[in-house]
Image (tube, rainbow, N blue to C red):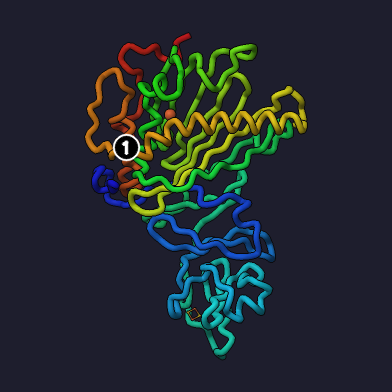
Amino acid sequence: MATTQDYRLGEFTFPRGWFMIATSDDINTHKPLAVRFFGQDLALYRGRETGRVVLLDAYCPHMKTHLAAPNDTSYVILDGGGTNIEGDSIRCPYHAWRFGPDGQCNDIPYHEGPIPKTACVRSWTVVESLGAVWVWHDPEGGEPEWDHPSLPEWDDPAWVRWKFDDLGELKQHPQEVIDNICDYGHLGPIHGSTVQRYENEFKGHLAIQRQCGPHRTLVSEDGGSPILHTDTTYHGPGVLISYLTGFYESILMINHTPIDDGLIKVWHALLVKSPSGKSEVTVEDTIAAGQFQHASLLAFKQDFEVWTNKAPCLNGMFIPSDGPFMKARIWYKQFFNPRERKNEFVSKCEGVYVPKGAEPYSQQ
Ligand code: FES
Ligand SMILES: [Fe+2]
């Protein structure tokens, strides 16, 4: 597998941005979860006092015990009712030091006197929305540059909420997935689309694709709209949101998060507006939406299957009738370099691009 350096993306191994790290359901348990992202082992849990989500560096500063690895033998866990989460804090299974959601040690049971300030682990910026847990990752340690993912439709009773499909790990650098945002040429052969109009736009931390045309899987042949319109945006390097109008109105989400350099974890989901047109979703709506999410997942698997087996595209043989791959790769570089250099990359890719021979989307 190829690395960030192989793709010459910039000085940071992992990009700046919001990333999905779990579904909300993953942490609806009383136990902490050991996860690994950005080349680091991490401890994720839901506080039992307030329900807030906490993400800490995994290794206890005392003697480097993993705070969230499965443990069924320590008396910290046995006496804690099967968990080492206490209120919104977590207690190390080895010598029982306890850490708060801010990462600071707030109890050492066998020690009197002040707790050293350095007895702490890093606490990450996390939020929960859309049925997922998001982390702000920033190699420079800065505040979030844009808002975490949210959708007003999530709280609208006329929309069927999604449950994420967990596609597991993909042994590819995320660059290979990012390329998809401008891959005009694959839409016919892979997805069965007959693209009528197509364009890409790059704007700050957003990379956009707009296209429409008949589609072999995501629209019905008998009734509904025969044309699928998709308006797709990468919000930073890890979160893709696509508005689909065709058979049903729906919102597609695909998230990928680096685990290690050249290895990612991937999720897919689809939010569907009441297929029967009701202002509150019905049981039938939920079933129809589930089937539509499954069809959307199959469409995504058409990409995923290729990615699973391909070699890294370090120097593509791009032609003018392809989408603007090189622009998208410049756009992607802004996240692998210091924030103060952002405009260097953005100014080299901002604008609207139409592949040679294609009709622009904006022109009716
Ligand atoms: S290793 Fe965590 S308390 Fe000692
Ligand atoms: Fe695709």
Report whether 111 appears left or right of 234: right
Mark 1, residues whose alpha carbon is within 10 Å: few (<14), some, or many (≥20)? Answer: few
254 and 330: which one is in front? 254
189 and 348: which one is in front? 189
Who's the residue at 57% across and 75% down the image? 91
Report whether 177 appears left or right of 133: left
Q: Quadrant of ligand 2?
A: top left
Who's the residue at 60% across and 79% down the image? 76
Residue 96 x, y percent position in the rendering: 56, 81
Report whether 56 appears left or right of 294: left
Say if 99 sits above or below 167 in the image: below
Query: Can residue 176 be seen in the rendering of this structure?
Result: yes
Who's the residue at 25% across and 25% down the image? 318
Three-letter amino acid code at the position of disc 1: Lys
Residue 203 x, y percent position in the rendering: 40, 31
Residue 165 x, y percent position in the rendering: 56, 42
Report whether 336 appears left or right of 273: left
Who's the residue at 41% across and 53% down the image? 259
Q: Is mark 1 within 8 Å of ligand 2?
A: no
Query: Can residue 145 be seen in the rendering of this structure?
Result: no
Residue 197 x, y percent position in the rendering: 43, 14
> Which residue is the site of mark 1?
310
Which quadrant holds residue 359? top left
Q: Name the secondary structure under disc 1.
A: loop
Count how many numbered circles sit on residues in the image: 1
